[in-house]
Image (cartoon, rainbow, N blue to C red):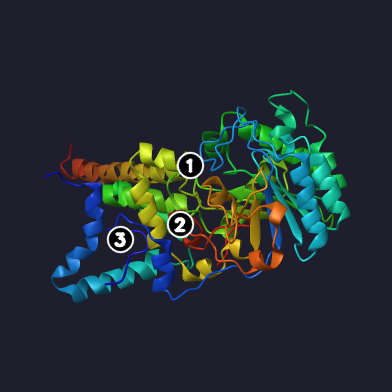
Amino acid sequence: MNYFESEDLKKFGDVGKFRKELMDKFFAYYNEVVGKDGALTKREKALIALAVAHSAKCPYCIDAYTTACLETGSSPDQMTEAVHVSAAMMAGITLVHAVQMDNHIEELGA
Amino acid sequence: MQALPILMTPPSESEFSFHEALREHDLHVRATRIETLQVNITKLCNQACRHCHVDSSPKRTEQMSLATVDRCLEILAKYPSIKNLDITGGAPELNPHFDYLVEEAVKLKTHVMARHNLTVTLDGNPVTKESKKYLPSFYAKHRVEVISSLPYYEEYFTDKQRGRGVFQKSLTVLKMLNEEGYGHENTGLILNLVYNPVGTYLPAAQAGLEADYKRSLREKFGILFNNLFTITNMPIHRFKEDLQRNDKYIEYMNKLVHAFNPGAAEAVMCRSLLSVGYDGKIYDCDFNQMLDMQISAREPATVFNFDFDQLSKREILFSSHCFGCTAGAGSSCGGTTA
């Protein structure tokens, strides 16, 4: 058995096999948030989701939101920029923790 | 469970019955009128695009004869309720009778549309080397509605689908058309662009993408146009072969079937359009034409045995590729339908 087979994405709904009502609530919420234009367009939401998919390292989501970005009119340049936003944020998040390191260096009197 | 819009569960069947989809939704879709005569007058083209459903290229030789062109004009003259002549190909300008067809149809007060690939203006005829640089002024003189493919407002997608250098050439010709008055408000010279996806996905929403095209083409290149038509890639011929080669045909068909929209099915273009092949044979649409699905009642329909009343109310020949016209917001030669 392999992990993260793209065909397995089709089984996502099967997670509702047990405690179906919880997954129903998730899907309703998910559809409401991601599947409709709101204060953000579906296109903007898809680019955000693509960036999150990369930072959360979800292969299913990368496949799904690459398609979603293309189907909402984004270009590879725009999608790649979204991934760079994600990468820059992850780098910044890592680096800003160095403030904690520096604080602790100070505390230790080093 | 509600279906997710993006993380969807496609149907598992490998058979794609369009008739079954119509039955499931209690739809009885047949022709209602003939408003548009779409004539495919040549398969010759200066380009050989990756997704061309006509399999056009500089090597094709099929051309509509003058006798068949004249017969099409006779039909337009006899039935003025056929308001539109939609001329396509190949690159239709590469038929030697193209200018004559336009000029004569305009005299009949028929609204003339030309599916113009833009680059032919600069490339000329790949066989005779004849220049086609007169086309923008010719179109403007006869007030032809120009409909041109531009798969994206950036170079990458356009050249990937239509060949290296096509984007830059297209920009040059779009500027030439703008200089003739096309795309400007109040000139009445209509320039519409056509988007279709580069890969195995559905088109973006037409209105939003049109706004993106207009903003980008105007800001970056000073180019104006009127409307954007989004068209779904039809799973036939070159695109189907591409899908099958990459083992994506079933996946793409499942996507189309899953996105079946009854509203789009009721608005399919074949209800009000007839398609004529270079040899005069009549079909429900250009896609059926390429699949050789000729309309046939007592005998195979052609422009030479044209029966207006019968064709206006005909049963339409559907097949699995028709899911391409009914997915999502629908697809037609004039863009979305639902």
Question: Horizontally, is B130 left or right of B228 in the view?
Answer: right
> What residue did someone put label 2 on?
B319
> What residue did someone put label 1 on?
B237
Callouts 2 and 1 close, C-beta under 8 Å: no
What is the C-alpha distance between the residues marked 2 and 1? Answer: 14 Å
Q: Split into 4 quadrants, where in the image is the N terminus of chain B?
A: bottom left
Amino acid type, mark 1 = His
The numbered disc on residue B297 is none
What is the C-alpha distance between the residues marked 2 and 3? Answer: 18 Å
Judge depth for marks 2 and 3 and give the one in front: 2
Amino acid type, mark 3 = Pro
Q: Are marks 1 and 3 on the same chain?
A: yes
- Mark 1 / mark 3, whichever is N-terminal: 3
Q: Dot 2, crowdedness within 10 Å: few (<14), some or many (≥20)?
A: some
Residue B324 visible to the viewer: yes
Question: Horizontally, is B105 left or right of A40 in the view?
Answer: right
Badge 2 marks a residue whose secondary structure is loop
Say which of B147 and B91 sits in front. B91
Badge 1 marks a residue whose secondary structure is helix
Residue B311 higher or lower than B118, as above or below: below
Give me the residue at 37% from left, 52% from top: A65
What is the C-alpha distance between the residues marked 1 and 3? Answer: 24 Å
Callouts 1 and 3 close, C-beta under 8 Å: no
Residue B110 visible to the viewer: no
The numbered disc on residue B11 is 3
- Mark 2 / mark 1, whichever is N-terminal: 1
